[in-house]
Image (cartoon, rainbow, N blue to C red):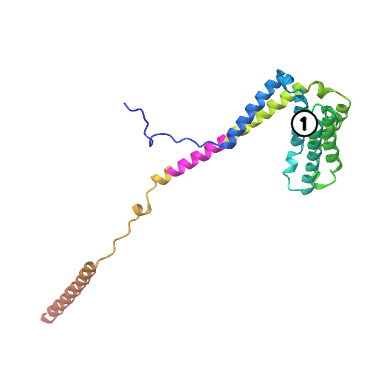
Amino acid sequence: MSTNANPKTMKPRRPINILEITCYVLAIIFVIFAILFWVRVFDGVWPGIKLFASGVAIIIIGLILNGLNLKRKDKVSKSISFIELLILGLGALFGFIIPSFIRDYEFNLGGPDLWLAIILILHAVIRLSLTKYQSFKLNVFYFYLNIAFLILGGYLIRSKFIESNIRIIIVTICFAIAAVLAFKALQIGNKASKQFRDQQEGRTSIQEKPSESEEVKAPPKPTKADKKAKRLEKKNEKRLLKADKQNEETSEEES
């Protein structure tokens, strides 16, 4: 007995969304990296893994603080945020990422505590100093948040908190990024599914809707014979009317 399903009765499946799959794959990669980093798998293979992870974390924190400003229409805000990210990117590249691959690298730019302090202080000082401009007006929450950034940055300059807890911090950041990517993939999938359902419902309604030719049938064009028959019918009607009129006149004369 054949087990092949009838193609007409099979429910159509949503096409694969590349962006959705990419987000899920990246989320899995971050989770795997966090687990391997936590169990110290990379320590023997790649001694500079902590430096590399610290550099990437600095870039990510910079993007979190300045990402929204890059989307603003104000050119001044965009330029300042871009300069902040450029400084942090160069610091992360030359202070952490490159030294993670080169053992005898002598260009020391400080530890992760110093650079996290630079991120927070630079961001807070710029935002607080530019509050006089209309595009940089801060509400009460963001004002005190920037004050907290200044205090935290001042504390981190002389502390070793980040360096001593770098493993926990990196793992937390990796899991947070994985969660964001999974949530984004879920949103993309739901949106794609809704669009696909709408398309399928639209096609079904078009197939079920009768055509205009079925709804309103145009009358057939009269042929020559039909036209001739209609003319004869009109002539006969005239003759009958004329005969009736003559009969009425004759009856009136007789009376």
**194 vs 226: above or below:** above
Q: Which quadrant, please, contains the C terminus?
A: bottom left
Q: Residue furthest top?
A: 39
Q: Is residue 253 left or right of residue 86?
A: left
Q: Which residue: 79% across, 46% down?
A: 79
The stretch of residues the image draws in magenta is: 189-203
Q: Which quadrant, please, contains the N terminus?
A: top left
Residue 195 belongs to the span the image colors magenta? yes
**76 vs 6: above or below:** below
Quarter residue 136 falls in: top right
Residue 238: x and y in percent read 20, 74
Residue 109 appears in view: no
Q: Residue furthest bottom?
A: 253
Instruction: From the image, tell me which residue sits under label 1.
Output: 97
Helix, strand or loop for the magenta stretch, by majority: helix
Q: Which residue: 79% across, 33% down?
A: 92
Residue 177 belongs to the span the image colors magenta? no
Q: Nearer the viewer, residue 219 or 233?
A: 219
Q: Which residue: 82% across, 37% down?
A: 123
